[in-house]
Image (tube, rainbow, N blue to C red):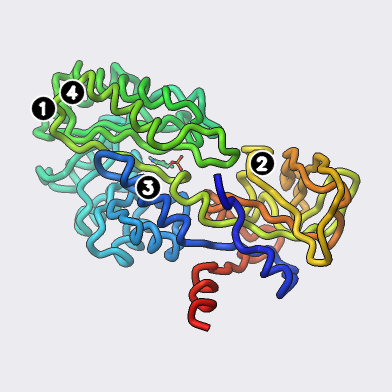
Amino acid sequence: MTNRFLGADAIVRASRPTDPLLLLDGDKARFAAAAALRAFPGIVAYAVKVCDRPEVLRALADGGIRHWDVASIHEVRALREQFPEGVLHFMNPVKAAAHIVEAHALGVRDFAFDCERELDKIAESTKRDPAVVPVLRIAVPNDHAKFALDGKFGCDEDEAARLLSLAAAQGYRPGVTFHVGSQCESAASWEMATDIACRAAARAGIEPSVIDIGGGYPAPYRGVEPDFASCVAAGRRAMDRWFPRFDGRFQCEPGRVLVAPSASVLVRVELRKGQALHLNDGYYGLLSELKWMPGVHPVRMLRPSGRSRCAPQAFSFFGPTCDSIDSMDGPYHLPGDIEEGDWIEIGMMGAYSTVLAGRFNGFPDAQTVVLDQQRDHRAAA
Ligand SMILES: *Cc1c(COP(=O)(O)O)cnc(C)c1O
């Protein structure tokens, strides 16, 4: 894996930033999108919740993304505004009726559900428009994911067979979907999950109009994770066994894998206490994933006065707020002489960072440096 860090050296040398910075490189998102589209034999819908910065969405569109998995009416409105021609898929299984009405008026046709009442709500709110596709969210094992997403949504296989029959009896050709959990590091999970979804459809006696194998594809934080193509191939194998002449839509909803490489976070060490480093950003800012996925993101020290020759040691991080939740145990391996006033670049931070940042203790949103523009400036100079 190349270039997990962005252009932090020049920034530290030039401006010695005292506040945390988000360094954004849209090219990385554009490349990831183009690669995913080459690898996927169907529709790739980006999961907008993972990073909704307009620069990043633009970069994904430049890479070829035309479909967007949205989870709230706010995302529906924002995406409709930025991409009037984009195809939106409303994949949150619980929605306000008024939001279904509005989304439908804005051209949305795919709506997720995982229970009978939501199916009724979709039918009522869209006046039984036959172009609507109710997509059933089915529960699948999340055993290999860093973040399990099975605690809230998804019906079991028996209920899935019943709901698919019910939707078919109402005149729909429903779809099926699932989520194996985020940062799922076993490709076999997609084969097992697709098998469950397809078996439920077969039991209901239907061929789904869409088989959507969800998100969860691992980002290459350490370089040992399975690649997108092998996860997709595993799902495809199960689909081909059940529906060898499938004439519907084969679809996926990647989030993290498309945008993680497109940003890093530049922080400064404000105090060292032994092996604990107090930073100027943390859990309540851009770094909440470091708490739940410890020691995975690549880190390196930046010191404009020169390099360190010290051997690496293990460190833990604390953020700048007063709450003891604001700690990230790591371990993170950094030069043994790292000290107050050094900077750390945390790479692969484009996913679930900006969207989860709050303003606790009065810390404002981090400033963004768009590296594309810097390159453009250099090219123009
Ligand atoms: C969050 C989410 C995704 C994206 O998940 P990643 O793990 O970031 O790929 C896709 N689909 C649904 C329904 C989601 O909730």
**Residue at screen point 22% across, 62% down:** 85
The tag earlier along the polypeptide, 3 or 2, is 3
Count of numbered circles in the view? 4
Question: What is the x, y in percent for residue 3?
Answer: 58, 52
Q: Amino acid at mark 2?
A: Lys
Instruction: Kindly report the distance in space between the C-alpha atoms of the residues bearing marks 1 and 2.
Output: 46 Å
Instruction: Kindly report the distance in space between the C-alpha atoms of the residues bearing marks 3 and 2.
Output: 29 Å
Q: Is residue 251 left or right of residue 283?
A: left
Q: Amino acid at mark 1?
A: Ala
- In this picture, is 323 found above or below 331? below
Q: Which mark is residue 35?
A: 3
Circle 1 or circle 4, nearest the eye: 4
Q: Which mark is residue 243?
A: 4
Which secondary structure, mark 1? helix
Circle 1 crowding by C-alpha within 10 Å: few under 14, some 14–19, many from 20? few
Q: Amino acid at mark 4?
A: Phe
Q: Contact (CB < 8 A) between labels 1 and 2?
A: no
Q: Is residue 302 left or right of residue 27?
A: right
Which secondary structure, mark 2? helix
Whether residue 320 can be seen here: no
Q: Is mark 2 within 8 Å of ligand 1?
A: no
**Residue at screen point 21% across, 35% down:** 210
The tag earlier along the polypeptide, 4 or 2, is 4
Instruction: Kindly report the distance in space between the C-alpha atoms of the residues bearing marks 1 and 3.
Output: 39 Å
Q: Amino acid at mark 3?
A: Ala
Q: Is mark 1 within 8 Å of ligand 1?
A: no
* Tag 1 residue: 169
User: Which quadrant does the N terminus fall into?
Assistant: top right
* Tag 2 residue: 291
Instruction: Kindly report the distance in space between the C-alpha atoms of the residues bearing marks 1 and 4.
Output: 21 Å
Instruction: Kindly report the distance in space between the C-alpha atoms of the residues bearing marks 4 and 2.
Output: 41 Å
Q: Contact (CB < 8 A) between labels 4 and 3?
A: no
